[in-house]
Image: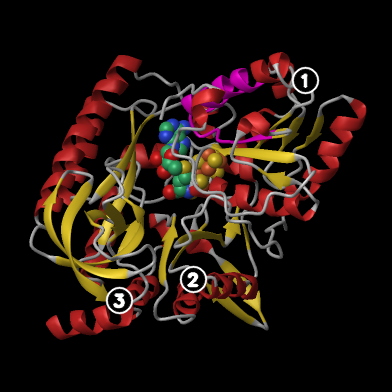
Amino acid sequence: MNLIPDLEILDELDVPRLTVRECEGARKVYIETYGCQMNVSDSEIVAAILQAHGFGLTRNPEEADVVLLNTCAIRENAEQKVRHRLDVFRAHKRKRRPGLQIGILGCMAERLRHKLLEQEQLVDLVVGPDAYRDLPRLLEEAEATGQAAVNVQLSREETYADIAPVRYDSNGVTAYVSIMRGCDNMCAFCVVPFTRGRERSRPVQSILDECTRLVEEGYREVTVLGQNVNSYRYVAEGTVVTFPELLYRISQISPELRVRYSTSHPKDCSDELLYVHRECHNVCNYIHLPVQHGNTEVLRRMRRTYTREQYLALVERARRIVPGIALSTDVIAGFCGETEAEHQDTLSLLEQVRFDHAYMFLYSERPGTYAARKYKDDVPLEVKKRRLQEIIELQTRISLENNRKEIGRVHTVLIEGPGKRGPDQLCGRTDTNKMVVFERQTFHPGEYVLVRITDCTSATLFGEPLGRTTLAEAARLEAGRV
Ligand code: SAH
Ligand code: SF4
Ligand code: F3S
């Protein structure tokens, strides 16, 4: 995607279907979302709140009365992207639509607060992640006073549990369900605890109800979300429900509902959780387990609370309890004080674990974090880039090698929608979260199909569909093979 799309070309981008009814005569809101899955889920909550107050939603920013950017602050370049988009919308407001209200939501709003108003003139709204219920009032206030309205209050309780998200951007097959908010971990590099506040878990029943509704609406997969889902904890009727228990209960809603989650912190990935993967056929055999670095001393500086050896032992345990489980990770290159030898440890860890996929980042200092206050961001940019490049090249090779081993195997794929290369193709994911592209034939999104893998790149598998199946049937076949 072009970093700075014009309003004109924005319409031609890969803008998903809008499934909500547009309210006649109502003010129309256009929402653009940056950052993680949690932000996607939050935008659905924002849409629900605004729709309940009579606003319409539009996917065409040209006809919007309100433009909301739901922002990310995780790295400097995430914020730059938003500032570029703001330039575009402000120019649009000046030249063509003086009544347009522009709002900044999410993590950047929370991090910069009033500073945003000084830095970015012509912004009407600055709203943090815990203040979305206040949006209708804030929009009204900004309109009435002609002044910017701000609410960046963080909360210890807000989970938006009672709000049914409006899935305006949905493929109708897979959905995110937020189960907790905030983070108490304070990893040295990370801005999230500052932008999202304290950790809190959403009531169990509201999660189960939302997942049940999704199944009734025809959804086939939920990904439950939290910054650190392993620390989910909710006391209901005197009993404590932890994450493995929650996951188990979600899996029991329907044998045809696939369940995934993100993100799980390695420090508290329990055996109990691994057994839920093993025992429940519809809990996917895939864990995103961010390691961040391969060197124990760097992990200590990052305040990740585990060592390289403990992480490797966890991988070993996961693979022993759940044979064939797929793993992905996050890696940061060029953290404060990283030596060449420490960087080599990240490479050797990647070699050793052989992740199926990795998200790889340059360290970006975030103001106010422990690292920004205590350490020097002293790895030169050129060195950071070279190290990141080495990490990317290695992981791309490993992903390709892992994918090549898939050729000839048969996977159960949940079809999500059309493939990128045209209407004759469909794409969907394996249980192990690999994207598979295959011929459409007579298949449809939402169906489970057995697909034999015939080819691959480092990021995608290609295959031939063998026929429809159900999750339960595929699990029986799998059990028969073992
Ligand atoms: N809660 C998740 C991570 C959320 S942020 C977890 O703990 O696993 C997603 C990823 O962004 C992190 O895993 C980390 O790899 C990366 N990240 C966070 N802060 C960063 C920074 N300051 N610079 C570069 N990458 C960062
Ligand atoms: Fe950030 Fe660490 Fe919390 Fe993840 S666990 S959101 S990396 S502080
Ligand atoms: Fe970004 Fe906030 Fe998510 S900083 S990664 S949008 S929690």
Near mark 1 (Cα within 10 A), the count class, few <14, some 14-19 or many ≥20, is few
116 left or right, relative to 82: right
Label 1 and label 3: CA atoms lie apart by: 57 Å
Q: Nearer the viewer, mark 3 or mark 2?
A: 2
Q: Secondary structure at mark 2?
A: loop
Q: Main secondary structure of the magenta part?
A: helix
Q: Nearer the viewer, mark 1 or mark 3?
A: 1
Above or below, comparing residue 378 to residue 313 in the picture: above
- Residue designated by label 1: 98
* Residue 234 image offset from top left, x and y in percent: 61, 71
Near mark 3 (Cα within 10 A), the count class, few <14, some 14-19 or many ≥20, is some
Is label 2's Cβ within 8 Å of ligand 3?
no
The residue segment tinted magenta is 67-89
Near mark 2 (Cα within 10 A), the count class, few <14, some 14-19 or many ≥20, is few
Q: In the image shown, does 472 or 463 lie closer to the viewer? A: 463
Q: Secondary structure at mark 1?
A: loop
Q: Earlier in the sequence, mark 3 or mark 2?
A: 2
260 left or right, relative to 10: left
- Which kind of residue does numbered mark 3 sit on? Arg
Q: Secondary structure at mark 3?
A: helix
Q: Is residue 387 visible?
A: yes
- Residue designated by label 2: 218
Image quadrant in which the N terminus is located:
top left
Does the magenta portion include 98? no
- Residue designated by label 3: 278
* Residue 346 image offset from top left, x and y in percent: 24, 38
